[in-house]
Image (spheres, grey):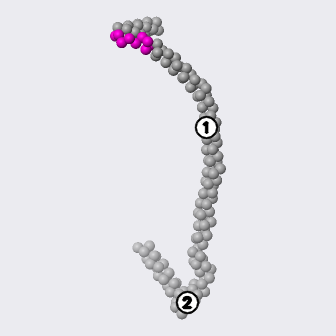
Amino acid sequence: QPMMLTSLLLVAVGIGAAAFVYRSAIQDRQRDPLERVQPALFRFLANRMWLDELYGNTVILLSKSAAGLTDWLDRFFWDGFVRAAGALAEVFGIFTAKTDDRGINTAVDQTMGGGRGFGRAMSAWHSGQIQIYLGVIAIGAIALLLLYAWLG
């Protein structure tokens, strides 16, 4: 209850002060009565307590500075880092392409050439007789058993 009475008292004092200050405002509409009575307070309130300047010099300035810093980092640091990594990958790609062409492709081509020769030799043995196929399977199975016995 005391809090409510205090609030009501403050509201009444505020209304009374406003009525006292603005009682002559009806006759003189050129100037605000508060400007005549309290010019410093009037300027303070008319400039919205300088909140715009305070906001501009703190929040906006900080935001612009952070945006400028991140823009600079993006343009000069990250773009440079990505371009350097791309150039390094390109050089590495040129090296690996030459290694692939000279080494790996040549080795695979020669291996496949040998496989092709083996396939031609096997096709010469292709007679269509099941006895020959079973004999080759039996020889392979015996070779695997001997290898297993030798290693085991």
Whether residue 120 is visible: yes
Q: Residues within 10 Å of mark 1 (few under 14, many from 20)?
A: few
Whether residue 41 is visible: no
Residue range (magenta):
122-130
- Picture quarter containing residue 30? bottom right
Would residue 51 be found to the left or right of residue 142 on screen?
right
- Picture quarter containing residue 53? bottom right
Q: Position of residue 152 (x, y in %)?
A: 45, 8
**Label for residue 29?**
2
Q: Position of residue 95 (x, y in %)?
A: 63, 32
Instruction: Check disc 1 and report its element: helix, strand or loop.
Output: helix
- Mark positioned earlier in the residue sequence (2 or 1): 2
Which residue is nearer to you in this view: 2 or 40? 40
- Residue in the image at 50% along x and 16% along y: 117
- Residue in the image at 62% along x and 66% along y: 57
Instruction: Tell which residue pokes out farthest to the bottom in this image.
Output: 27
| For residue 113, above or below residue 77 | above
| For residue 38, above or below residue 28 | above
The residue beneath circle 1 is 89
Q: Position of residue 69 (x, y in %)?
A: 63, 55
- Residue in the image at 45% along x and 8% along y: 147
Would residue 119 be found to the left or right of residue 39 on screen?
left
| For residue 28, above or below residue 48 | below
